[in-house]
Image: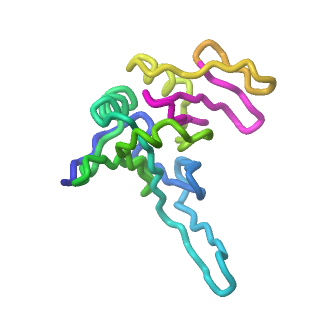
């Protein structure tokens, strides 16, 4: 079943994705880049779109979080009960039930780049999203959960299962 997407704070119209792996950089006004990777001699693999797979323990709770708090729009409901959320630039999150794997990733699963991080954090916080606090040297966060780095600003949050995500400017 395909569901029409609705606008989201972290899925801005006209924003294209760049990058490879699960760390998706989205930058306004940029064309989607093609990352070329040589996986074996003579093999040339192009990665155009990417999909991050996110294991959760409870799909009802996950739907409340990803749609209600994060503001993503489901674009597909799969037969197995999983959901696909469009994230801009041809990228997406595929959220599926797996109690055994939920919350086990040690790193950030996906990062959305936005043009006004302060506004996005403020509005997502009003939706009930809680941003992580850090006092790690070089990554100290302010009261809103935003860390300033030499590359810009970033704020991390977790879903109900402890899967870590970020928004970045």
Q: Position of residue 55 (x, y in %)?
A: 43, 43
In this rendering, position of residue 82 left or right of residue 19: left
Q: Residue at x 69, y 85 (%)?
A: 41
Asked whether residue 14 is in view, the answer is: no
The N terminus: image quadrant: bottom left
Q: Residue at x 60, y 56 (%)?
A: 19
Is residue 6 highlighted in magenta? no
Q: Residue at x 57, y 63 (%)?
A: 33
- Residue found at the far right of this picture: 137
Q: Position of residue 108 (x, y in %)?
A: 59, 40
Q: Would you say the magenta stretch is mainly helix, strand or loop? A: strand
Residue 117, picture quadrant: top right
Is 125 located above or below residue 116 in the figure? above
The front one of 54 and 119 is 54
Q: Position of residue 59 (x, y in %)?
A: 30, 37
Asked whether residue 75 is in view, the answer is: yes
Q: Which residues are magenta?
A: 145-169
- Residue found at the far front of this picture: 100
| Count of marks placed on residues | 0
Q: Residue at x 55, y 50 (%)?
A: 24
The front one of 15 and 74 is 74
- Residue found at the far left of this picture: 1
- Residue found at the far bottom of this picture: 42
Is 77 located above or below residue 72 in the figure? below
Residue 160, picture quadrant: top left
The front one of 66 and 88 is 66
The C terminus: image quadrant: top right
In this rendering, position of residue 75 left or right of residue 13: left
In this rendering, position of residue 129 left or right of residue 28: left
The front one of 101 and 46 is 101
């Amino acid at each position: 079943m395909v569901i029409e997407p609705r606008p989201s704070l972290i899925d801005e119209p006209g924003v294209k994705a760049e990058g490879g792996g699960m760390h998706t950089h989205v930058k306004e006004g940029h064309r989607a880049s093609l990352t070329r990777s040589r996986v074996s001699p003579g093999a040339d693999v192009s990665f155009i779109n990417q999909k991050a797979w996110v294991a959760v323990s409870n799909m009802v709770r996950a739907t409340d979080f990803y749609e209600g708090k994060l503001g993503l729009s489901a674009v597909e409901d799969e037969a197995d009960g999983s959901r696909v959320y469009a994230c801009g630039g041809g990228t997406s999150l595929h959220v599926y039930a797996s109690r055994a794997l939920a919350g086990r990733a040690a790193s950030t699963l996906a990062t959305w780049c936005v043009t006004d991080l302060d506004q996005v954090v403020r509005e997502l916080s009003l939706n009930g999203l809680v941003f992580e606090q850090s006092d790690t040297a070089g990554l100290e966060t302010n009261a809103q959960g935003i860390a300033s780095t030499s590359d810009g600003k970033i704020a991390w949050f977790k879903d109900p299962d402890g899967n870590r995500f970020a928004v970045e400017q």
